[in-house]
Every structure is written in structure tokens, then in C-alpha cells.
Amino acid sequence: MSLPPVDPAVTAAAVAALPARLKGRLDAAVEQASAWPTDTTGTTVTVHPDDKTTVTLTIPVLTEADAVCSCLLFPRCLHRAAVLSAAPILTDEPEPSTNAGPEPSANAGLKLSTDAGLESAVDGGLESPIARAGTGADPDLTADSQPGADGESKPSADAEPLPPAVFEPEPEPEPGSEPGLAPGPRSSAGLKRESGSEPGLAPGPRSSAGLKRESGSEPGPRSSAGLKRESGSEPGLAPGPRSNPGLAPGPRLNPGLKPELEPVAAGAGAGKQRGSDAEPARKSDAQPDPGAAATAIVPGQAGPVPAAATGHPQVSAAQRQAAHHLWSAAAEMLAGGVPGGGAVMQASLLRAAHQARSTGLHTAAAATVRVVEHLRAARREDPAFRRAELADDLRELLGTCHRLATGDGRAVGVARRDYQPVGDLRLFGLFAEPVRAATGHAGAVTYLADSQGRVWVVSDVKPAEPSVALTATRASVDLGEVRLSHHNLSRAGLRAINAHASAAGRLSHGRARQAVSAPGAGWFEEPLDALWRVPLAYQVDRWLTAAALPAQERPAAHDLAYVNGVIIGTDRRGMLIKVIGAGTAAEGAEGRGTAIAVEAPHEDPALPYVGNLRLLATQAQGHPVRIIGRFTGPARIDALAVAAAWLPPSYGGHADLGAQRLTRADVPGPTPCDPPPPPRPAPPLHLVRHQLERVVATGRAALLSGAEQDARRLAAAHLTTAAAVVEALAAAGVRRTRDVFGRLDPHDSEHLAQAWLTAAVYERAASAESTRVAWS
């Protein structure tokens, strides 16, 4: 079934309109909707749930009027909600006014990027366009835009700007209001305590915002009984959870957790401050609320200081409220895990994401959409689903909300960025890589480098059959007057006049651009040879620094590895090579070096990665090679291309391992060499990761057993901080408190989310430091 993309707000509204009896049947209906026949006519898609019912969708679905059902229950019908929940998510951001056109992104605009200052902080390069099993196409490389009439790439016509966000100043506390009550989500707007009301009333959910309690009313659950509306309060104000006195609005932090977020990350020995802490200030699309007293946590200060003192944008009251709703929705999802992440929970997340996007929280909104997409893949048992990716995106979402709650304006992010003029470029081809993604995208990507060593990319990735990747590198490049294939361009070069590119290094292509082909350079010639002279420790540091940033903020090619080594054999990890330093591969195998494992980025037998690496490991043993790969872990890379002095000239200087198939006649044959060294022992940080992924998979029920045993093993390995965060996570998982009426406290989910985020931040920092040591 092919359905058009749907705006998250439309799906959330359709699910919210369902009666309670139909919400319980929604998950089963979504599974059935995948088999319902569809007809596409022009700009409309018609779905036939049965012989008498039709659901008509307008491409794209931007408003509730674009999704209509013919049944009598419309708009509160199950058919419409099921179809919208099964449709892909429309993630277009408001399109800024540009001269060169906005930077395209995967899934019609999901890709977010940061200011250009990030590129100077981390060496240029590109994110992986090869989707490992379970990963999607590189957002920055997916062709969601098609060439326009002039041949230049244009943004998708589906993108429709959202209305400008409107912010309201925080209301001043009224006389007689409760002292110490911090402004929170809209639950306290227009409320004040009447004389004679119970001061010890237990906080509960507000069901009547803008109302006040009559004197003499009895304490009990918050309802409209005994309440009257105050003049000036907003009549349509949605109810929200009540903030506790003395707590700033935002995620509820658990004061009983000893390992705090920042101390834990520092205690992991990360050695470096988080990469985003060194970014230059960026401006949010949303205007800050002048009435909001935004603060930020500054290292070395005793407490919060005004955000203006840090040089970063403020977080408005509306953005704090949106972040709080995102935190609450994500915490509820974490408590239930994938089994509880049905269509109703997904709609709750999408509603919060829409509110966040409308207030300018682009980073949090994008992370939320990715979490929902992972939940949908898991519930339909998609082979592409990876639990680790869901855990990573959930950590990013909760971490962003936490930063926003503390007033960190750097966590806001930006929606989309333009192609900017980068001047005249003289580029030299590095290698070409086929793209075959689980999201249904296929194509090819060519990497090029300039004389300063910065990596640029020319991509041709779009929705296509997987078989397209087999021949995509032989397709012609659409860039000015260049008439070369991706395969030939990776061995030649080009000259671009007044080139335009994204901050990530993606070149704007099309016939309107002025570019011609030019002679290239080999890997052992200048300026490309300089890439392999960079010490491996610096390359690892560049990768880990960028990997600590949110996915949409990572600079391009941050994970490319340039390695000189000698093939020394194989083991269960893959082909082994011994790194022989930052010089050329012709130095030989006499020097000492680190043994690293070289794996295939894609195990599909239709692509030649596995066969090429197997041939090299057995028939080129003892010979020096020069490799371009992608960092994947401690002393481990995925091989993308290889060059050597013994490679036949017919390969043009190097072999693209995913596009060319080596033969026995191309390799020199094995020679004797020293046996491979045993792998280095690593700290058992996988136990922390295991507990994190268990909670994501099954919710708090996973912590009923097993966590205490892992905490003891971590303590025995002298990882006391790791043991502490696992114990705190286990305690938060079994914590179930009740209010005075015996009802379960919904804030327990927020305590679990706080403990889970603490453990996730520690695990990320500790694993990065362990990886850095393994590469030393």
C-alpha cells in the first residue's frame, strides 16, 4: 500500500477524536490497513477498507480536510485514524527565503543542520550514505528534491511553510497566589488559591484550566466540581499537568539520583567537553519571549545565570512548555517500551512533536519523529528495525528536552539551511560508493577532496529499487558540464565556478551550475596523500567529537578513516590489518602498529564487499594496502575503497569495494607474516548498554530482574559509576508510588526517564573514551 505523507498534527488529531472503545482497536486496525487496496488518481489516494467504505487522501495530507472517510462515524471513525497512522510522516520544515535554494534532506526535509561554525570545529566529511541493515539513507544525501526546469536541484513542492509561531508572555503571579509556584505548563495560567482552600491539597492533573476553587469545597481529585472561571482566563486553554511548588517547569528531576548527568559524563573520563559546548551561538527560528527569564547552567558557576550572559539564545516560555510535553510523552513511551508504543502513544508523541516544531524546537521535533518511525518499524516486525537506533534517538530526545529545561538555547536547532556560495573549487576524486538503503532509496555517492583536505560530495540518491545500486556508480553525474560517471569522477577531478554547497559539504548539482571535468590525482599523490598523513589518533578524535553531537548536527565525512596498513590475516571479526603509521603504505610491515578489524559495510551478496574482503584477506596477506573506511567501533572500520602499488592499472589507482569485483589475478598472493595478535580486553560497558536497550524494548518490566546482577559485575570490574547508574535505573524501574487515593503516580515514569537518561549519557561518554583508548 502506497500512502502519501501525513502531517503529524493531522494524525494526532484523528487519533484524539476517536472514542475510547475505538482507541483500543486502533493497533489491530493499523495492521489491517497495510493490506487495504488503494487507488491513486492525480493528487488523491483512495483507500478501500471494505466494499462500501472509502478513505480519500489528498497528496500531501496537510490538514484534517485532506483526509476524508465515507463512513457515518467520520471524522471520529476508525478507518481514517488507521490509514493516517499507517501512512509515512510528513517532516517538511518551514522553507526559508534563499537565493540558492534550501538544502534537501531525507524524507522530505527531516534533515536538520547547524551553523557553519561546526565545520571548523570538526574536520569536514560526510555521514555514512550506506545504510547498514536497519539504517536509512543518509539524510543529507537523499534526493528528496528533483531538478527544476533549469536543471538545478529544487526543494520538494510538498514543502508548505507552517504559520509563524505565536508566543505569549508568562503571566505575572497574582496577589494571593501560592508562593514559590514556578510558572509551568499551561496548567497554572489564570489560577489562584481561594481563601479557605486546603493548603495541603495533593497535586493532581488539572482538568479545568483557568478555574479557581470555591471556598469550602472539599479536597479531592482535580475536576470542574466546585470551581468557577476567573475573568480574563483563557476559555480554550488545554488542561496540563500541574507543576509542583518550587520546581522550574520542565522534566521532573529525581533529587535522589546521585549520579547527575554532567558529573557522570565527566566521570566517564571522556576527556573532552561535549562538542556542542564549543559551538558558536546559533539563532533559533522562533523569537525568544521577552518576558521569560531564561537561564543556563555555566560550568564553574554556583547556579543558573541569565542566558544572555552565556552568549547563547534564550529559551522562551512556549519552548519550555513544548519541551516539557515532549519529555512527558517520551517518558510514558519509555515506561511501556515497544509493546506500549501503539498508535495512541505514537499520536501523543506526534502531537508533542508538532507543538515543538511550531515553537522552533527543530532538533527535538526531528528526534521525536525518528522515535515514532522506529516504533512503527518494530511493531510491524520490519527486519530493518534496530533496537540500538531506537535507544540512541530516545537518548537524544530526552537529552535535548533536559537541556531545554535548563535554559540551554543551543539545543533548539535550526530547521533547514540554504546552499551557500563557497567560491571556486578544484576537487580531486576519492572514491565512489553505492547506496542501498532499507528505506527504499538507492543510488551512488562520489567523494572528492580539495587541496586543503576538506571532503565534498556529489550524490544521486532517490527512491528506487535496490537493484539500482548495482549499476548506479556507472550513471552520469548531473553537475554542470561534467559528463563523467560516478566511477570515472572518483578517479578524475572537476573545476567548479561559484559553487554552492551545504554546510555539510554537499554540492548543489544541476545543469545550471558551472563545472567542468579536470584531471585527478592518485591516492599516493598530492593533495590526496596528505589525508593519510593525519595521525590516526586525530582522526579518531574527530570522529568521536562529532558522534557526540545530535545526528542532524554532525558534520559531513566525520567518520571517514584513512588507514595505511599490512594485511595480516583474518579472525571472527573480519580481515585484520596492522596499522603502520601515518606515512605511506610503502613503509612495509617492519614498524609497530595497532591491529584493527576491517569489515564489510553491507553484507548483501549482490554487492561485492564481502567477496572482495575475503579475497584480500586470503590472497593478499602480508602485503601493504591503503584503505578508506568508516569508523564503527574500537579498532574496527568498514572498508569502502582500497589502493596498493600491486593493484593493476586498469582499476584507475584504487578499487571501490562496493562497485568493483576483484579477481584472483588482481592480487599478488599471500606471503608469510606474523600471526594476528589477540584482541584487547575491553571494559564490560556492554552491560550498561544491555540494560538501556532492555528498557526500550519492554519498558519498566525489564528491570524487575537482572539489573542487580549486572551492577555487581560492573562493581567487580571497578566501574563504580557504571554500577551506580545501573542500580539507580533498577530502583527507578521498580518504584511505584501512589497518591492519597491509591492511584499510581504518573510522575514515576518521569523518574524512570531521568534515571535512564543518566545511564545513557554515562554509557555514551564511557564508551567513547574506551574506544579512544582502543585506537591508541
Image (cartoon, grey):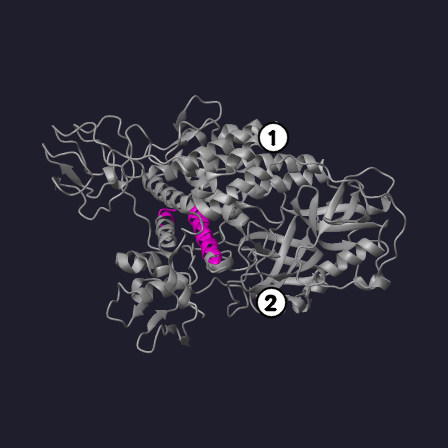
* In this picture, residue 427 sits left or right of residue 139: right
State yes or no: residue 387 in magenta.
no
- Is residue 121 or residue 542 the one in the foreground? 542
Where is residue 735 shown, x and y percent of the image?
39, 35
Q: Which residue is mark 1?
A: 271
Alpha carbons under labels 1 and 2: distance apart: 42 Å
- Which range of residues does the magenta coloring cover? 356-378
Residue 466 badge = 2
79 lies above or below 589: below
Neighbours of disc 1 within 10 Å: few (<14), some (14-19), many (20+): some
* In this picture, residue 357 sits left or right of residue 711: left
Nearer the observer: mark 1 or 2; the answer is 2
- Is residue 218 or residue 589 the one in the foreground? 218
758 lies above or below 36: above
Q: Is residue 501 visible?
A: yes
For the residue marked with disc 1, what is the amino acid?
Gly
Per the image, label 2 sits on a secondary structure element best described as loop
Where is residue 104 shown, x and y percent of the image?
51, 58
Where is residue 113 shown, x and y percent of the image?
50, 48
484 lies above or below 668: below
Q: Is residue 655 visible?
A: no
For the residue marked with disc 2, what is the amino acid?
Pro
- Is residue 468 or residue 415 the one in the foreground? 468
Which residue is depicted at the point 39% across and 72% down? 45
Q: Earlier in the sequence, mark 1 or mark 2?
A: 1
Q: Quadrant of the C terminus?
A: top right
* In this picture, residue 771 sits left or right of residue 643: left
State yes or no: residue 370 in magenta.
yes
Per the image, label 1 sits on a secondary structure element best described as loop
Where is residue 317 shown, x and y percent of the image?
32, 39
The quarter holding residue 588 reads: top right
